[in-house]
Amino acid sequence: MIDIETTVRGVLRDVLGLGDDRVAAFDENTPLFGALPELDSLAVAGVLTEIEDRLGILIEDDEVDGEMLESFGALTRFAAQKVLG
C-alpha cells in the first residue's frame, strides 16, 4: 500500500527543493502555503501535479483551496481522501 505521508513529503522535497531534514521535521501542524517561501502560487501547480502522478489521482481545479494547502497535515489528509475515494 502507498504511504501517502511519505509520498507527500517526497513531493514537497523534490518539487520545492527542500532538504531531507527540513521535510522530515514536518508534522501535522507545519504551515505550508504562506509560510514556506518556496511554495508560491506557481509551485502549488507543480506540487499538485506531482501528487497526482505519484498517487495516481486526479485533483480537480474546484478542489484546490487555501485549506488544503494550509498545513502538511491538511495536504496529507486531502491526498489520502483522494486515494481512498
Image (cartoon, rainbow, N blue to C red):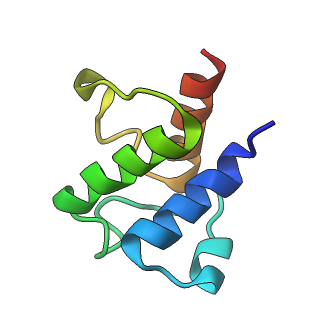
x and y percent of residue 26 in the render?
A: 62, 67
Residue displayed at 51% across by 71% down: 13
In the rendered structure, the answer to whether residue 30 lies left or right of residue 35 reads: right
Residue that appears at 54% across and 45% down: 54
Would residue 11 appear left or right of 21 to someone viewing this image? left
**Where does residue 36 sit, x and y in percent of width and height?**
36, 72
Report whether residue 73 is seen. yes
Residue ID at (75%, 46%): 3
56 sits to left or right of 69: right
Which quadrant of the rendered structure holds the C terminus? top right
Location of residue 33 with respect to 21 vertically, above or below: above
Above or below, comparing residue 2 to residue 12 in the picture: above
The residue at 31%/74% (across/down) is: 38
Q: Quadrant of residue 66?
A: top left
Inspect this view and state whether residue 29 appears.
Answer: no
| The N terminus, quarter of image | top right
Which corner quadrant of the image does residue 20 belong to? bottom right
Q: Give the side of residue 82 with respect to residue 41, left or right.
A: right
8 in relation to 24, above or below: above
Q: Residue furthest right?
A: 1
Among all residues in the image, which is located at the extreme left? 42
Q: Position of residue 76 (x, y in %)?
A: 58, 44
Vertical placement of residue 43 versus 52, above or below: below
Image location (x, y in percent) of residue 60: 30, 24
Total labels: the figure holds: 0
